[in-house]
Image (spheres, rainbow, N blue to C red):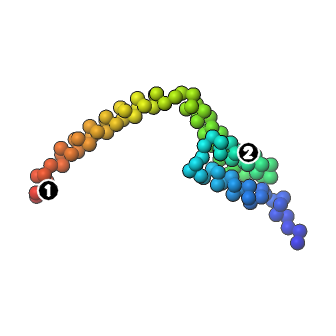
Amino acid sequence: GDHKEGSKGAPMELMSQFLVLVSADTLNEDSAREAIDIGEEILEYEPTNRVILEYRKTLLEYIERSRAEAKMGDSDEDTDTTSDDSRESDNNNDTSSITSSDSDAK
């Protein structure tokens, strides 16, 4: 039969390729770019596909961010994490001193 499937939307394999890329834990700048390319193809079939449009925005932001981070270097982040750690270990000491053996004896 002459189904009108083709004209209705993008090929399923494009969609599934796209979704595999964006949902993978291994997302990086390269796969994000690849996903954007596939997204562009899908948008040729379905210019109003909300899912693709949303993801595309997110992916573009992701690439921007990873570029910015690469430029900045990690030095800032390191200083932040050290201060966080020391704060956390202080809290731990407090809690351990509160939990004394007396409360267990009761």
Please say if 12 is above or below 25: below
User: Residue 91 at x, y = what percent?
Assistant: 27, 40
Is residue 97 toward the left or the right of residue 72 in the image? left
Q: Residue at x 52, y 28 (%)?
A: 73
Is residue 78 toward the left or the right of residue 33 in the image? left
Q: Which residue is mark 2?
A: 37
Q: Residue at x 49, y 30 (%)?
A: 74
Closer-to-camera residue (60/32): 32
CB within 8 Å, label 2 to label 1: no
Secondary structure found at label 1: helix
Q: Which residue is mark 1?
A: 104
Quarter holding residue 31? top right
User: Residue 7 at x, y = what percent?
Assistant: 84, 58
Residue at the extreme bottom of the image, as rendered: 1
Amino acid type, label 1: Asp
Residue 43 visible in the current orientation: no
Residue 9 visible in the current orientation: yes
Q: Residue at x 23, y 41 (%)?
A: 93
Please say if 51 is above or below 70: below
Closer-to-camera residue (28/43): 28
Is residue 67 toward the left or the right of residue 87 in the image? right
- The image shows a total of numbered marks equal to 2
User: Residue 30 at x, y = what percent?
Assistant: 65, 42
Amino acid type, label 2: Asp
Mark 2 or 1: in front is 2
Is residue 37 toward the left or the right of residue 74 in the image? right
User: Residue 18 at x, y = what percent?
Assistant: 68, 52
- Of mark 2 and mark 1, the one earlier in the sequence is 2
Secondary structure found at label 2: helix
Q: Crowding at label 2, few (<14), some or many (≥20) Cα neighbours within 10 Å?
A: some
Q: Mark 2 to mark 1: distance in Å?
A: 62 Å
Quarter holding residue 12? bottom right
